[in-house]
Image (spheres, rainbow, N blue to C red):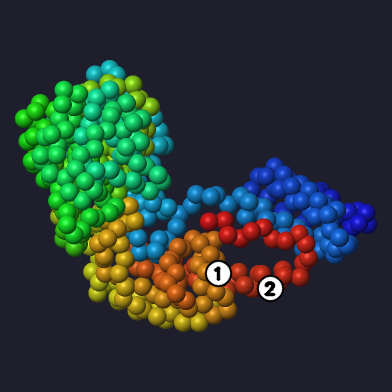
Amino acid sequence: MSNVLRNIPSVNELLESAALRKLMERASRSVVVSGVRDFLGNLRSEVQSAAADIKLPTATELAERIARWIQHEEQPTLRSVVNATGILLHTGLGRAPLAEDAVTALVEIARDYASLEVDLTTGQRSQRIAAVERLLIQLTGAEAAAVVNNNAGATLLTLAALATGREVIVSRGQLVEIGGSYRLPEVMQASGARLREVGTTNKTRLADYQAAICDDTAALMHVHTSNYVLEGFVESTPLTDLVALAHREHRLAIDDIGSGALWDFGRYGIGGEPRPQDSLACGADVVLMSGDKLLGGPQCGIIVGQRACIDAIVRHPLARALRVDKLTLAALAATLRLYRDPDTVEEKIPLLTLLSTSVDNLQLRAERLAPQLAACPAIAAATPRSDTTYLGGGSVPTQQIPTWCVALTPAHESVDSLAARLRRGHPAVMGRVHRETLLLDLRSVFARQDQLLVKAVQALANHETEKAATSATGPPADPPQDAS
């Protein structure tokens, strides 16, 4: 063992290798030196714990392995992905991609200082909501608006500002739980408001709300169940009736519409998604929604409604804790501006572009891609296939959307291994496994990314060649490859 340890090259010797000198041209010397030291430390520990002497690779081979290890360790965890899962609002992949106008606005505001809380006309301090409030008023018909970090924050802040210490009446059939263990009753408890459940899971009538109203009632709350559907023997109270009752009893009516559609998604076969302008037209005092789902903007929670309610909300101490930064406001403002032109909005909002792409277009792309992918050495077969997908697991999970995929059958490995290697690749690609094939669903792939799919699959052969060339270099083992 002692002979093996003495034969491990020094840090300085390894730094003179071609592989590490080349790496230092792209990464700082300090990063490379630190990586070499960490790698050698792991190697010495492995040698000392080995039951028998092990054969070391040559200094050149060891340097090449260290260079690959450092590159792996320095690879950012957060990077762009080609979404070939078919799920357009994939929470794990950041939900809606931003419009080019929003990206441009975000970069412009990020690069320099910005008029976040300064009125450039008067030179006086202003409110950051001014960046988007006028647009939200125009698009929804609200009297005022506020924006916080997400819709859970919007719910928490609204209830804290308008109902702390008092009751809020909600149907039992609308006590939602969203992914990530968000539960409405728990958020309500954290806000200081008290939940008053009415009705049953499948039936809540107007009379149930009426019977629950008391002196302690602050609001009646309607919640859109965006991630599940009750079917069969069911009955719910229309928002118009709920609002009329609340106002007749001099209580507030709050409508949490969840995903936040400003556009009519019925044209894509997706029904039942409420819009804030419709809720406000029904008389709701406050409407809550997300910015990064159906609206297609950055992650945020949007609150629109009556001026008196919004004023109370923005004055609450939690408003500062939940506020958004200049980047979110810049991206949201640019996204909202696009909705002012109905003739071009589908071309400019990426989510709407993907949804409005015709099935014939997807089929043509799948048939064009299949032979290119089949020619890659890692693929035994690539077949165009019609299928169905969904908008998102947490947004309209029950309404199917027609799509076309390319079904990949791996040549030399399991389908799970193929999927994992594509996730780790450059570019990273995420598809969905179906039985013994990997489906690359084009419903969530932009046409400009088609050749990236080909590039990613072709790169698998290069990886196999490199792996074969280094398989006999001995310990230490390469780092785990699946960093997804």
Q: Is residue 198 left or right of residue 105?
A: left
Q: Secondary structure at mark 2?
A: helix
Q: Which numbered dot is residue 68?
A: none
Q: Position of residue 297 (x, y in %)?
A: 30, 46
Q: Is residue 115 visible?
A: no
Q: Quadrant of residue 105?
A: top left
Q: Residue furthest right?
A: 3
Q: Is residue 78 visible?
A: yes
Q: Residues within 10 Å of mark 1 (few under 14, many from 20)?
A: few
> Viewer-nearest of labels 1 and 2?
1
Q: Which residue is mark 1?
A: 417
Q: Residue at x 32, y 56 (%)?
A: 392
- Report, in whole angstroms, how far the alpha carbon at label 1 lies from the one at label 2: 17 Å
Q: Position of residue 333 (x, y in %)?
A: 26, 39
Q: Is residue 419 left or right of residue 103?
A: right
Q: Residue at x 24, y 19 (%)?
A: 122
Residue type indicated by callout 1: Ser
Q: Residue at x 39, y 30 (%)?
A: 113
Q: Which residue is mark 2?
A: 468
| Quadrant where the N terminus is found in the figure | bottom right
Q: Secondary structure at mark 1?
A: helix
Q: Position of residue 75 (x, y in %)?
A: 58, 52
Q: Nearer the viewer, residue 148 or 434?
A: 434
